[in-house]
Image (cartoon, rainbow, N blue to C red):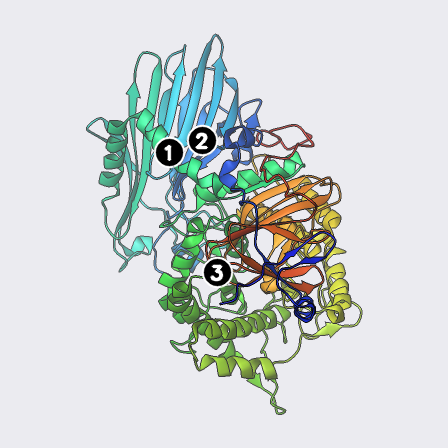
Amino acid sequence: MKEKPSVVITDDHRIMHEGLRAMDVLKLMAKLTIAVWLLTPLAVLQAADVEWAPFLARNDMVWRGLPRNWDSGPFLGNGRLGTIFWRNEAGALHFEVSRSDLYDHRRLEGYGPLFARCRIPNGHFELSFGQGRPTGDMRLDLWNAEARGRVTLGQSSWELRSFTHANRDVIVIEITGTGAAPAMAWCPDVSKPTRNRNPPKDLKGYPPQTQREVDGIHVSVQDMPEGAEYHTDGQGIGQYATAWGIVTTSNRTVVYISTRLTYPGATAADEAVSLVKEARRAGLSALEKSHREWWHAYYPKSFLSVPDSAIESYYWIQLYKMASASRKGGPVLDLMGPWFMTTYWPGVWWNLNIQLTYWPFYMSNHLEEAEPLIESVWSQRANLAKNAAPHGADSYAIGRATGLDCLMPVGAEVGNLPWTLHNLWLHYRSTMDDAYLKEKLFPLMKGGFRYLRHILVVQPDGTLVLPKTASPEYTESVASCSYTLACLRWLASTLMVADARLKADDPVVAECREVLARLEPYPIDPATGIMVGKGTTLANSHRHWSHLFMIYPFYEYTWDQPDRVELMERSLRNWTDKPGAFAGYSWLGAASMHAAAGRGDKALQFLHSFLNKSSLPNTLYREGSPVIETPLAFARSLQEMLLTSHGDLIRVFPGVPVAWGEVAFADLRTEGAFLVSAKREQGVTRWVRIVSLAGEPCRIRTGLSGALKSQSSKRVVIKELGNGVVEVKLAKGASVVLYTGNEPPAIDLAPVPPSGPPNPWGGQKPGK
């Protein structure tokens, strides 16, 4: 058999060939296909190569005085159990202790989910160091996921350290010092919903917590009795309990704390005591070791560094927050995670919050931590069917806000479940796990689509139109609602893609095809662009951009479509020119849309608008009450300035501002299950590395200037598609480095030089 020739494209675009006739060369050039045999070994590159401890240390949160409130307190968590603490007005350290699954179970009738199936408070510890107000400082060590600090009162001082163990439901507090051990008191909360907007007149808190001691372990027990007076008749009993054990030596006190919830049943106290006993037997050193091992394996799954200190630090605090608040096997992340505060919104919100909360998990390569969203929706599909009544068991829907059971009639906001399914689709596209697609996601998508199909109205001319539905928080209902139309178009189109992938030949595809062919168009206003709905322009400032979902996040309309750019410009401008009612996430939605348009400078302005106007010093966020999604959405917006992958095309550095001449990232995960790394120096992209995790087709716009070269350990085929896009054929597990220039670049991963002081977050906002 004749040996196949090797082909290398050099920097002057000449083809070096062996054994090829001139006609063969011309044919090869016409196809614009580059078959590359690499002569040098591929440099090993991964995020784990970063010197993580010093890098994250520059992004730690730092307090130059003791934190004063929830807005500035250090927070610790393991996806279920957590604490946030600060010095209160009396001078004691207030350690709030809660669980993110601490939800009530009252009957819904007459109460609704926000008073019956809602998040409820637990209590806090107070550590008192003596008379007066102590001073001190604090640091949240991201790398080790622990808070450390010094507390001083008079001539006495104490070193304090605390962490919530990574995979045990135990909080550890260690205090060493020259003074007497601080007094420690448990302060239980009244066990009832905290929402104060029209509570039921007969709403009653459960009986007060009771305390007892078991084998040297203290435990405070909150019983949740069954009975009509608590609106729990027919529901069964429940219980939650907080246990703590104290080990004291000559100058050191170690406190082990656990909180457990049982429903149905009343074994929480026994379980909490058992966990404290186990922790006490294991000892501080062993707990510290296993805790740090988990976190040291977590961070290196991806890497990102930008020259803006405030932005880089904010990003890494969100990566810490993600794993502190959401874990595989744990509850779905609600509006505050493990860090309770009295709230108007004690539940899970489905018209923006839950979706934005999980957005950064996918690209940061932390998919296990995102699994609670999948399991929440999948495990509660029977309730999704109840929400969709009266349309039958083939339909799924969800309302605006629920408890962990996802139970609430859909109401007018009918697009909430499809938008949630978009998150689940991003999860699939990040893994290309066809078993997950077939067994869970495809059935959920079918149910979501069929609910919307049921409510469509057939016009005399055969057109399918929507009844009045809601655009979140702008209208109660409006005909031809753009939010609902975008959700329906995305869901129908994606179901067809999923069916083709699975070769399922499901009957739903014919329904999707029919809906897309006959569905009414988006309502357009000549002056303002895409409307909220028929007869309703966006006339007032609005924090949601729901009417623009076909632009973002669904990317039905893109900046690569010349015939749509003017409409997109007009529509986006009409929204951003009215910022008076913007919330934090509004700035971030605007940043992502401008990044997609290639306007990195504008995207950066919107990021800074959010940080300056909306963020709290400890990077938590609230609008009256805690709402966790917005800082996490910040992380996604930053990711999208550096990398996007919608429409089967990976785009490297699509929205980087001019001022960011130095940028580096590694192992960010894209659709198609690729890990992408890239480096930018002096405003120029130097190299791009792609690792294929699933062997899918890869189309990428690298941003590299000049003749493209590659470096790999195996043969790869690269096809130029024009407009800076190439198609790279990589087998599963294979990788390639793309670059330009005469010599292969140095493939290194170091943090870029910062443009501001380190540790800008914690006790105060940057520049304050």
Q: Residues within 10 Å of mark 1 (few under 14, many from 20)?
A: many
Q: Give me the C-alpha separation between circle 1 and circle 2.
A: 8 Å
Amino acid type at image mark 3: Gly
Compared to residue 195, the image places residue 272 above or below, namely above
**Against 744, is 412 above or below?**
below
- The image's mark for residue 695 is 3
Q: Which amino acid does label 2 sit on?
A: Asn
> At numbered mark 1, what does the secondary structure look like: helix, strand or loop?
helix
**For marks 2 and 3 on the same chain, the one whose residue lies earlier in the sequence:** 2
Provide the residue designation for mark 2.
144
Q: What element carries label 2?
A: loop
The disc labelled 1 sits on which kind of residue? His
Q: Which of 229/442 is in front?
A: 442
Between 73 and 678, which is closer to the camera in this rendering? 678
Q: In this view, does 55 lie above or below 98?
A: above
In the rendered view, tell whether residue 114 sits above or below residue 758: below
Q: Position of residue 140 (x, y in %)?
A: 50, 29
Mark pair 2, 3: CA separation: 35 Å
Crowding at mark 3 (Cα within 10 Å: few <14, some 14-19, many 20+):
some
- Contact between marks 1 and 2 (CB within 8 A): the answer is yes
Reading the chain from its start, which is encountered first: label 1 or label 2?
Answer: 2
**Residue that label 1 marks:** 291
Question: CA gap, disc 3 to disc 1?
Answer: 35 Å
User: In the drawing, does residue 424 fall left or right of residue 245?
Assistant: right
Camera-side mark, 2 or 3? 3
Residue at 46% over, 28% down: 147
- Determine whether, in the image, residue 187 is placed left or right of residue 575: left
